[in-house]
Amino acid sequence: RIAWPDQKNPWAELTYFLYQSLGNLFLQKSNYNRYWVMATQEQYFHGLDAEEKVINWSGRKEMQPGDLVFVYRTAPRSAITDILRVKEKPWFDPWGAWDGFWVNLEKVRSIEDIPFAYMKKDPGFNQWGLVRRHFVGTISEPVPHSIYNRILEELSPAIKQELDLEPE
């Protein structure tokens, strides 16, 4: 209170400093490709369908620029529908984001739906923990390379060539 007499909650300022500034010192840097899935409910579909190429979304601190993000839309579509790319490093916001971090995502393209009903029956997808729990509680989670490879099998050769997507 002595350092920030005008602040109603100086702990919030301190928390922000610790996560945003010092936290980056402890994040592991890696050079391998990361893939993510983000689940969204119908009330947020408009953000994905808007004309803007870059959208601000709740993310994870481990996300890195260039990471691919697959969007899973819940009911009524219940399918993986879009590919996005992490545009810049996530930033901490203790007051707004689900996991405390926001990230700018660039829309890469829409894809033909990969429906949940198909994933549930498919021997490759049905071993994925998210499919087993019906994407319940999912906001943004890493995608294992085996599942990424399975998603690639569902994409058309033209999309894979256009985006230069290779199996891991």
Image (cartoon, rainbow, N blue to C red):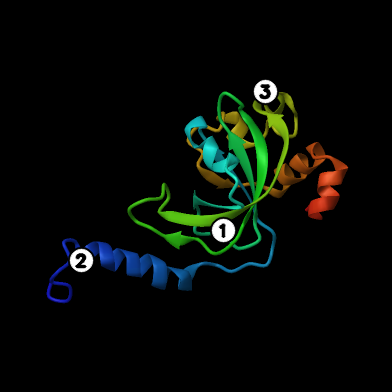
Label 3: state its secondary structure: helix
Q: Position of residue 62 (x, y in %)?
A: 54, 59
Other residues around mark 3 within 10 Å, as few (<14) / some (14–19) / many (≥20): few
Is 145 displayed left or right of 164 in the figure?
left
Is 162 displayed left or right of 38 in the figure?
right
In the picture as drawn, the residue positioned furthest to the bottom comes out as: 3
Residue at which label 2 appears:
10
Of the two numbered discs 2 and 3 on the same chain, state the one appearing first in sequence.
2
Quadrant hosting residue 164:
bottom right
Residue beneath the point at 35% across and 68% down: 18
CA–CA distance in space, label 1 to label 2: 28 Å
Is 149 displayed left or right of 137 in the figure?
right
Q: Position of residue 33 (x, y in %)?
A: 69, 59
Which amino acid does the dot numbered 1 rest on? Met
Q: Position of residue 89 (x, y in %)?
A: 54, 64
Disc ID at residue 140 = none
Residue beneath the point at 38% across and 65% down: 19
Of the two numbered discs 1 and 2 on the same chain, state the one appearing first in sequence.
2
- Is residue 134 placed above or below 82 in the rendered structure? above
Q: Position of residue 112 (x, y in %)?
A: 74, 34
CA–CA distance in space, label 2 to label 3: 49 Å
Residue at which label 1 appears:
63
Residue at which label 3 appears:
117
Residue beneath the point at 80% across and 40% down: 155
